[in-house]
Image (cartoon, rainbow, N blue to C red):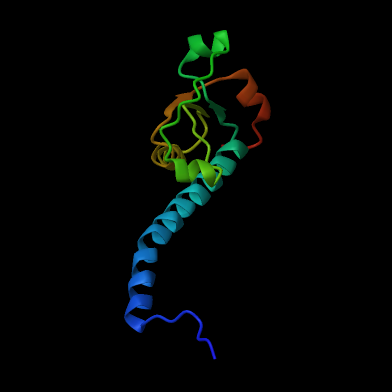
Amino acid sequence: MARGFQFRLRTLMIIVTLLTLPLSYVGWQAKIVRERKAVLGEAALHGCIFSLYRNRADLARGVVFPDSPIPWIRRILDDQWLDWITVPGYVTEEEFDQIRATFPEAYVERVRYHPSINALRTDPR
């Protein structure tokens, strides 16, 4: 009777240990992506405007820069790179700081009045 593939318990423990590091990294990156999507959704409800443009001159010309500082594993997990976030003035300082901390690659600016933002405003703050 032929035996199937056999290995020692030590080999199994080594394989499990070696797989733990890359899988924990993927889990950590997935957690970051979930947090960023949650903050992005909350910020959109507050009327924030997001852009993939480098600056306003590029925005006017319609130039998009596809190079992303986000790691490739997070791009696979459907993370979104943002370069510029405009936050309305009625957003609290705590929420503003949370947006800045969650999107360190983005330039985050606060504006007092923006017609498209104030037209969407439903928050009484």
Instruction: Using the rendered view, name the quadrant where residue 1 is placed.
Output: bottom right
Residue at 49% in and 49% down: 35
Number of labels in the image equals 0
Instruction: Using the rendered view, name the quadrant where residue 117 is placed.
Output: top right
Foreground residue among 44 and 93: 44
Q: Specify whether residue 56 is in view.
A: yes
Foreground residue among 113 and 67: 67
Q: Specify whether residue 124 is in view.
A: no
Residue at 64% in and 21% down: 116
Name the image quarter holding the C terminus.
Answer: top right
Left/right of residue 79 with respect to residue 118 in the rendered view:
left
Q: Position of residue 15 (x, y in %)?
A: 37, 70
Task: Check the image and name the residue furthest to the front.
Answer: 1
Residue at 47% in and 38% down: 92
Foreground residue among 29 and 16: 16
Q: Position of residue 6 (x, y in %)?
A: 43, 82
Q: Position of residue 45 (x, y in %)?
A: 62, 39
Q: Position of residue 16 (x, y in %)?
A: 38, 71
